[in-house]
Amino acid sequence: MLQGRIIKGVGGLYFIDTDKGIIECSARGIFRKSKITPTVGDYVKISLLEDNKGIIEEILERKNILIRPRVANIDCAVITFSIISPNINIDLLDRFLVLAESQNIENIIICINKCDLASEEDINLIKNLYSHIYKIAFTSTLNNTGIEDLKKLMDKKVTVFAGPSGVGKSSLINAILPNASLKTGDISKKIERGKHTTRQVELLEAWEHTYIVDSPGFTSLSMEFIEDNLDYYFKDFREFLGDCKFYDCKHIHEPNCAIKEQIGQAIPKERYERYVRLLNEILERK
């Protein structure tokens, strides 16, 4: 059997990228009976039929799967925010980072777009908060700043762009893939929010072994399900977890807390405060 990756699915047909090119396939009925849905990003094994068509025989084990958008085996998430228009929201940025960490995505990149509008103070704020734990790309599609740096970070990976509306995700993908011709939404000047312009999940091949998910990115910011692991998803906390006096330490009121000892040192005070606010929010909702 031939192995490949689903790059698009339309009306029960799946397009598989293989060593023999793109092959249109249907899925065996056993998947439907077992309530298993082949998903864009899945690695699959197929048997070949005539006319360069095939049948999906097996779906290989997934390392992760996003629900919205529904896509499997993501290697990289580019968490994209703009400096202004709309103004950067650090609290929301941390929420997106926590969500990306919770999805078992190995490579997480912070992309600060519209950096041509940024002051040195703006740039330093982001660097001071995140440069010790994440790769950061400062980009501008207006003058093509940082695009090559971002492409290097995405090389040989399947990447999803995520972030709030209006920050330029589609424009960035257009800059990386000039032939993709994604529609870019006009920013509403009244409400400072962009309009969603992408509809169907698809893997766009940027260059060899490098794909971009054509989708608005994961959009659900519900975090109730990560209460017990929230501290782990704050990446700068990880090396100190397990050093607290209490094994179930929440790092708020407990004595001899290793996390609190690092505030203002390895852990920026602002990051810790956002952890506390987010944990309290989750607990209150429960």
Image: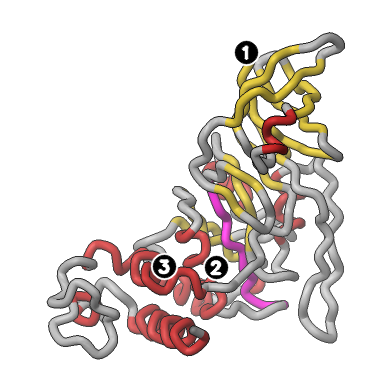
Residue lying at the far top in this picture: please name it: 50
- Which tag, 3 or 1, sits closer to the chain's start? 1
Whether residues under marks 3 and 2 lie with C-beta atoms below 8 angstroms apart, the answer is: no
Q: Secondary structure at mark 1?
A: loop
Residue 113 visible within the image: no
Amino acid tagged 1:
Met
At a point 74% along the width and 60% down the height, the residue shown is 142
The one nearer the camera, 193 or 135, is 193
The residue that mark 2 highlights is 96
The residue that mark 3 highlights is 130
Q: Secondary structure at mark 2?
A: helix
Amino acid tagged 3:
Tyr
* In this view, the mark in front (3 or 1): 1
Q: Secondary structure at mark 3?
A: helix
Against 215, residue 90 (above or below) is below
Percent position of residue 80, x then y: 61, 63
Query: Which stretch did the figure color magenta?
Result: 76-85
* In this view, the mark in front (3 or 2): 2
The one nearer the camera, 246 or 275, is 246
Against 178, residue 92 (above or below) is below
To which quarter of the image does residue 205 belong? top right
Whether residues under marks 1 and 2 lie with C-beta atoms below 8 angstroms apart, the answer is: no
Q: CA distance from mark 3 to mark 1?
A: 45 Å
Percent position of residue 254, x then y: 20, 86
The residue that mark 1 highlights is 1
Taking the magenta stretch, the answer to whether it contains residue 79 is yes
